[in-house]
């Protein structure tokens, strides 16, 4: 008589080896994104800074009551020098109490006229991460110092407010990282 051999795999082993399709796609996406980022990094010995941080103080009235509420706008500038600015990302944090970020506006140059990307759910009262990019031609992008965003804040109480700003990335039209400088100022317009 012919005998047929079969191998029985315990269900627990099958379950450990199965990866849901959504997880497999997510892992493939992450690996692809890491490979793309690594490929665009270029020369690891280049002199382009990874990030730039600044500390700023924006003046406020000293004669306001402790419970007085006022609204102000903070302009955010990126200076890319002679290079065209196509992409940027930064973090803005108020180090003082009594500040709540309540709105985000776009910049002055047509390339960044639309409000930058940010996660409203992740915006934590006095902290926000902003970023924008434009895939246009180099001649349609800003160079030099340009207002890239305006952040609206609600301030309670008197006095100056201390801000920390960190530019985490800036790039030109071909995706090359470029050195850029950031600054913030109280909006007057």
Image (tube, grey):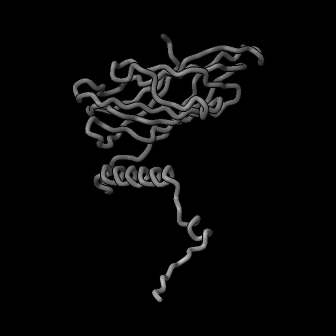
Rendered image quadrant of residue 177: top left
Place of residue 1 in the rendered image (x, y in percent of width and height, measured from the top left): 47, 89
Place of residue 69 in the rendered image (x, y in percent of width and height, measured from the top left): 70, 15
Q: Residue furthest front?
A: 1
Nearer to the camera, 80 or 126? 126
Would you say 183 lies left or right of 47 here?
Answer: right
Q: Report the label total.
A: 0
Q: Residue at image x 60%, y 34%?
A: 122
Would you say 38 lies left or right of 164 here?
Answer: left
Rendered image quadrant of residue 2: bottom left
Q: Residue furthest bottom?
A: 1
Q: Residue at image x 26%, y 32%?
A: 82
Place of residue 76 in the rendered image (x, y in percent of width and height, measured from the top left): 47, 26
Q: Is residue 167 above or below residue 117?
A: below
Place of residue 19 in the rendered image (x, y in percent of width and height, measured from the top left): 52, 59
Nearer to the camera, 15 or 29? 15
Nearer to the camera, 96 or 170? 170
Would you say 65 lies left or right of 40 here?
Answer: right
Q: Residue at image x 40%, y 53%?
A: 34
Q: Residue at image x 67%, y 20%?
A: 155
Nearer to the camera, 162 or 71? 71
Q: Is residue 59 above or below residue 38?
A: above
Q: Residue furthest top?
A: 189
């Amino acid at each position: 008589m012919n005998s047929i051999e079969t191998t029985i795999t315990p269900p627990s082993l099958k379950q450990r080896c199965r990866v849901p399709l959504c997880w497999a796609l997510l892992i493939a996406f992450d690996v692809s994104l890491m490979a793309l980022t690594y490929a665009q990094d270029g020369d690891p010995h280049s002199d382009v800074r990874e990030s730039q941080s600044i500390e700023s103080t924006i003046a406020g009235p000293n004669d306001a009551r402790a419970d007085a509420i006022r609204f102000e706008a903070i302009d955010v500038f990126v200076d890319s020098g002679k290079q065209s600015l196509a992409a940027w990302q930064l973090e803005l944090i108020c180090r003082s109490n009594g500040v709540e970020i309540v709105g985000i506006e776009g910049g002055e140059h047509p390339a960044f006229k639309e409000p930058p990307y940010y996660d409203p759910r992740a915006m934590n009262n006095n902290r926000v991460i902003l970023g924008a990019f434009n895939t246009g031609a180099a001649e349609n992008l800003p160079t030099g110092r340009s207002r890239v965003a305006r952040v609206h804040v609600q301030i309670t109480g008197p006095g100056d407010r201390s801000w920390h700003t960190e530019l985490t990335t800036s790039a030109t039209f071909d995706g090359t990282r470029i050195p850029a400088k950031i600054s913030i100022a109280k909006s007057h317009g």
